[in-house]
Image (cartoon, rainbow, N blue to C red):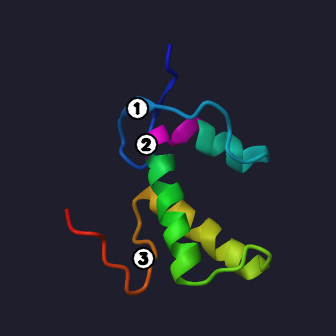
Amino acid sequence: MTRTVKCRKYNEELPGLERPPYPGAKGEDIFNNVSRQAWDEWQKHQTLLINERRLNMMNAEDRKFLQAEMDKFFSGEEYAKADGYVPPSA
């Protein structure tokens, strides 16, 4: 049976992650409060931010920026978009 969580982003019961995506308290918080759908959307958005803003994951400031944007993304606040990104037309 699929595990469900009350998703912080969508404010509804949705299928959850299979395991925490990070170690520690942050991973447990995401595991318990973020749906699989929201996590997948964040993964795609995070990739856009890393590529378009040329973030370096070896740089602590870039990792801190992504962490803050992830928190905003899941809580429904305004979050950073990829500069100049235009989604493909359908």
**Which region is colored magenta?**
32-37
SS under mark 3:
loop
SS under mark 1:
strand
Residue occupying image coordinates x 36% and y 45%: 10
Q: Position of residue 20 (x, y in %)?
A: 68, 39
Q: Position of residue 27 (x, y in %)?
A: 69, 45
- Magenta segment includes 76: no
Residue occupying image coordinates x 21% and y 68%: 89
Q: Position of residue 52 (x, y in %)?
A: 51, 81
Is residue 35 among the parts visible in the rendering?
no
Which mark, residue 37?
A: 2
Residue occupying image coordinates x 40% and y 71%: 78
Q: Which of 9/44 is in front?
A: 44
Whichever of labels 3 and 1 marks the residue nearer the N terminus, that label is 1
Whichever of labels 2 and 1 marks the residue nearer the N terminus, that label is 1
Task: Judge whether 26 appears above or below 66 on screen.
Answer: above
User: Looking at the image, do the residues carrying marks 2 and 1 touch, with CB atoms under 8 Å apart?
Assistant: yes
Q: Residues within 10 Å of mark 2 (few under 14, many from 20)?
A: some
Q: Which residue was labeled with disc 3? A: 81
